[in-house]
Image (spheres, rainbow, N blue to C red):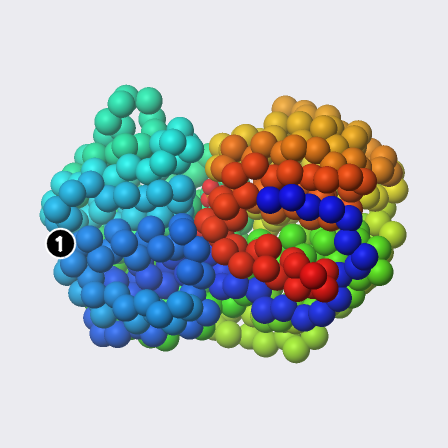
Amino acid sequence: MKLKKVEGLKGTISIPGDKSISHRAVMFGSLAKGTTHITNFLSGADCLATIDCFRAMGVRIEQEGTVVTVHGNGLRGLKKPEKQLDVGNSGTTTRLISGILSGQDFEVTLSGDASLNKRPMGRIMKPLSMMGAEIESVNGDGCAPLKITGKPLKAVRYESPVASAQVKSAVLLAGLYADGRTSVTEPALSRNHTELMLKSFGVQVLSEGTTASVMPPKEMTATDIAVPGDISSAAFFIAAGLVTPDSCITLKQVGINPTRNGIIKVCEAMGADLTMSNVKDDNGEPTADITVKTSRLKGTEIGGELIPTLIDEIPVIALMAAFAEGETVIKNAAELKVKESNRIDLTVDNLVKMGADAEATDDGMIIRGGNPLRGATIHCKYDHRIAMTFSVAGINAQGTTVIEDAECVDVSYPNFYEQLQMLAGQ
Ligand code: S3P
C-alpha cells in the first residue's frame, strides 16, 4: 500500500463492529440454549477464526456479512473437533477458548500463525491448571500449540498479575464449568465485555472494583447482540481527523464503554477538538457518534489505570504525540511488548524512520512532538494496528510511504483503506 499527503479528510463513516464483543457474542451464543442473532458483527479474520473453531466443535453458525446467527448447543453441547483448532492470528480466540475447553470432556489441540504461536500462554495455563484442567504447551515454550484436556473444574479465586481481559475471561469462562463461585482480581480494571455479556446470557456475575466473579449456571440463554463500532478501530480515524489539516469527520455509533474509552480522555488532555453526540446505552455498552476536527495538540502523560483502557490504541496515540507540541510520556505499558508484535519497539522504530523524535523505554515510550514526518517503507511484522497507524502517518508525511504486508488490516478492519480513500475524497 502506497500513501501520500492528502488535502484533508471530510465526511461520515460507520466503524465496523467491536472485535472483542464480536468474539464473545459467537462464543457465548455457541454455549447458550437457543438462537443468538448478532448484528454489526466484525467480519475480520480474527473473529472469523472464532466462528470456524465453534463450527469445528459442532455449532451451526450462519454468517452473511455482518449478520451472524448462532444456533447454540447449550453449555455442555460442544463436540470434540476432528482436527486441531486453527486460531489464526487471534490472541482473544486462543485465550478465551482455552477457558471454555478446560471444562469440556474431550482433548483438543489449538494452534495459530507464526505471530500467535510466539505469544505468552503461561498467563492462562497457570490459573486454568489451578482449576484442574490439563493444559500443555506442545513445544514446552509456554506458547501455542496448546493441548487442552478438559476436566471437572474447581472454583478458584485468582489474583492475576496482569490487567488482562483475556486472562480474566479465560478464568471466568472456565468458571462456568466449576463447582462454585470463581473470581478474578486484577491490578487494574481491564475491559469488562465478558462480564456484561455473560449477564445478558443469564449468568450471575458480580463486579466489585477490580474483582469479577461468576456462578456456574445450569444453562445460558440465547439473546440478541447488537455489536457497537470498535473504538480501537475508530482510533485511527480519530487520530487522522485530528492531525490531518482541514479535516472534519464523524464516526457513527462507536462503543464508549468506560473500560475502553481511554483514548477519549487522552484526546481531551491533548486539547483535541472532539465531540460526542447521540449517546445511547445498550446493556452497559454505550455508543456515541464522535466528531473530530483538525486540532493543535499538546503533549501529555499516560500511565497507571488508564493503560488497560487504551492498550490497543497506544501506537496511534504515539503518532498523535509526534504531531503535538511538547513531550508525551507513556509508561506502565510493558504489555505492549507481547501483543501481535512488540508494539513499543515497532512503533518507535517506524516513527524514528519517518523523522519523529521518539525513544523506547522499559515500559513505554517518550515522544517529543513537532518534527515534520517524511515518507518511509514501514515494516509492520503483519501487525494490523501498526499498519493502520503508519497509514495515518503516511497521509501526513512528505513523499511516499509504503506499508508492507498492508493486507494484515483484514484482521480487524477489512475496509480500512476504502474508508480512508473515501474520506480523502479519492
Ligand atoms: C482483548 C483484550 C486485550 C486486547 C485485545 C483484545 C479482549 O488483550 O489487547 O486486542 O478481547 O479481551 P489483553 O487481555 O492481553 O490485554
Label 1: element kind: loop
Residue 256 location, quadrant: bottom right
In the image, what residue occupies the spot 66% across and 27% down?
349
In the image, what residue occupies the spot 59% across and 69% down?
14
Q: Nearer the viewer, residue 234 or 175?
A: 234
Residue 127 location, quadrant: top left
At which x and y percent is residue 381? 52, 33
Q: Is residue 227 above or below residue 45?
A: below
| Residue matched to label 1 | 79
* Image quadrant occupied by the C terminus: bottom right
Lateral position of residue 425 relative to residue 177, left or right: right
In the image, what residue occupies the spot 25% across and 39% down?
110
Lateral position of residue 140 relative to residue 207, left or right: left
Total numbered circles: 1
At which x and y percent is residue 416? 57, 56
- Ligand 1 within 8 Å, label 1 CB: no
Residue 129 location, quadrant: top left
Q: Nearer the viewer, residue 319 or 163?
A: 319
Q: Is residue 28 visible?
A: yes
At which x and y percent is residue 108? 17, 41
Q: Is residue 292 above or below residue 182?
A: below
Q: Residues within 10 Å of mark 1 (few under 14, many from 20)?
A: some
Lateral position of residue 278 relative to residue 93, left or right: right
In the image, what residue occupies the spot 70% across and 33% down?
376
* Image quadrant occupied by the N terminus: top right
Lateral position of residue 418 relative to residue 191, left or right: right
Q: Is residue 195 visible?
A: no
Q: Nearer the viewer, residue 143 or 196?
A: 143
For badge 1, the amino acid type reads Lys
At which x and y percent is residue 321? 77, 42
